[in-house]
């Protein structure tokens, strides 16, 4: 696997070695030893999967007292995946990085605890998988508005197209009012 730090070094783009032939393809999406060798000594406690249609935008979500690290990837389709640094002590506080994850490129993104996470579906539909380092705790979850002006995330939406968001995400608060990490 190739582990490539992004503009926020703690967020890592992972490119697995894909072995393809006439039958299809194979790759390892997670190996404890391989990730540890890259400095990512992780313990996952929960696997999640999601299927969403074109222009569905989920996020920006995070848990405050039990923050989740997430290893995310796409099985079918394509998404634009975003991580926002919510660590006040970090030099990258308030910055975001994004990556296109597709079934064809097999890329994964490691989003460590301390970040908000969201994604936009670019294809007709996308099947999205993520491994978490903490269990989901609804009472601990927070959300920041996807189109927050201070964050200025450049979501790759066609002109005049509004994403499909949940009622909760539509009512999410501003980044400047968000509960953040030390």
Image (cartoon, helix red, strand yellow):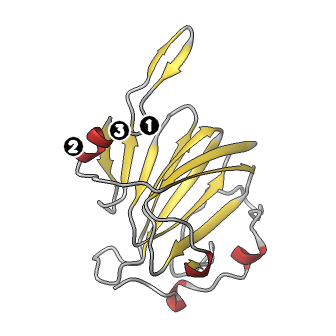
Residue at 66% across, 43% down: 127
Q: Earlier in the sequence, mark 1 or mark 2?
A: 1
- The answer to whether residue 58 is seen in the rendering is yes
| Front-most of residues 2 and 129 | 129
Q: CB atoms at circles 1 and 2 under 8 Å apart?
A: no
For the residues labelled 3 and 2, the Cα–Cα distance comes to 10 Å
User: In the rendering, which numbered label is found on residue 159?
Assistant: none
Up-down relation of residue 106 to residue 56 (above or below): above
Horizontally, is 51 left or right of 3 in the view? right
Up-down relation of residue 51 to residue 154 (above or below): above
For the residues labelled 3 and 1, the Cα–Cα distance comes to 7 Å
Residue at 38% across, 28% down: 17
Horizontally, is 51 left or right of 101 in the view? right
Up-down relation of residue 154 to residue 51 (above or below): below
Up-down relation of residue 152 to residue 155 (above or below): below
Residue at 45% across, 66% down: 68
Residue at 72% across, 82% down: 171
Image spot of residue 93 (x, y percent): 36, 78
Image spot of residue 129 (x, y percent): 57, 47
Give SS at disc 2.
helix
Image spot of residue 69 (x, y percent): 42, 62
Image spot of residue 148 (x, y percent): 59, 79
Q: Select label 3 or label 1 by which is in front.
A: 3
Tag 2 residue:
37
Tag 1 residue:
29
Q: Which of the image's four quarters has the C terminus?
A: bottom left
For the residues labelled 1 and 2, the Cα–Cα distance comes to 15 Å
Residue 144 in which image quadrant: bottom right
Tag 3 residue:
31
């Amino acid at each position: 696997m190739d582990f490539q730090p992004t503009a926020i070094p703690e967020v890592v783009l992972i490119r697995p070695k894909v072995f393809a032939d006439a039958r299809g393809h194979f790759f390892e999406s997670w190996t404890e030893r391989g990730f540890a060798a890259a400095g990512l000594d992780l313990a996952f406690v929960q696997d999640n999967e999601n299927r969403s249609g074109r222009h569905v935008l989920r996020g920006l979500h995070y848990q405050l007292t039990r923050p989740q690290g997430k290893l995310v990837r796409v099985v079918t389709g394509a998404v634009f995946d975003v991580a926002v640094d919510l660590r006040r002590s970090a030099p990258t506080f308030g910055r975001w990085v994004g990556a296109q994850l597709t079934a064809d490129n097999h890329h994964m993104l490691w989003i460590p605890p301390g970040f908000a996470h969201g994604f936009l579906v670019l294809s007709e539909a996308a099947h999205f998988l993520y491994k978490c380092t903490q269990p989901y705790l609804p009472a601990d979850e927070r959300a920041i508005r996807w189109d927050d002006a201070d964050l200025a995330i450049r979501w790759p939406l066609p002109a005049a197209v509004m994403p499909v968001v949940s009622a909760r995400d539509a009512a999410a608060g501003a980044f400047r009012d968000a509960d953040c990490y030390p």
